[in-house]
Amino acid sequence: MKSQYLSIIKTAYQAFNARDIDSVFKLMHNNVHWPKAFEGGYVIGLDAVREYWTSQWKEINPRVDPTSIVERPDEKYEILVHQLVKDLDGNVIFDGMTKHIYSFKNHLIYRMDIEDI
């Protein structure tokens, strides 16, 4: 496994959970494709991701922690994550495992997809 991608992935989750958008963006391509998990479709570009995340955080409080990372033969990275999503009152909306698939371009996160487990 390419260690720089492993480090990027781990750092991205840590920064996301800390709501440190700018630190995550240092790891993303300017034209990143990011899934709108609860709505479907994608947002494209850093500004769109910022708008999506900040809007999302006004309604829910997600925490996403990687539990395993595997490099696929197609040079994508499959990350099994534990996802805990609460509403703003602390009530659990989702507590379970999800699979995130990352693609890189120029050593930056270019695309993230969500797959069923």
Image: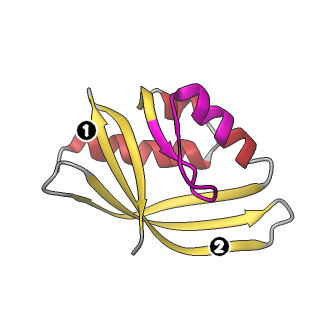
Q: Quadrant of residue 111?
A: top left
- Give x and y (percent) for residue 7: 33, 43
The mark found on residue 82 in the picture is: none
The x, y position of residue 20, in whole percent, is 61, 36
Q: Find out whether residue 44 is within the magenta segment.
A: yes
Viewer-side label of 1, 2: 2
Dot 2 amino acid type = Phe
Start and end of the magenta stretch? 33-52
Q: Mark 2 Cα within 10 Å, few/some/many (few <14, many 20+)?
A: few
The kind of residue on which mark 1 rests is Gln
Q: Earlier in the sequence, mark 1 or mark 2?
A: 1
Residue at position x 53%, y 31% from top?
Answer: 23
Q: Is 107 displayed left or right of 2 in the figure?
A: right
Q: Residue at x 83, y 59 (%)?
A: 88
> Which residue in the protein does label 1 denote?
4
**Quadrant placement of the C terminus:** bottom left
To which residue does mark 2 refer? 94
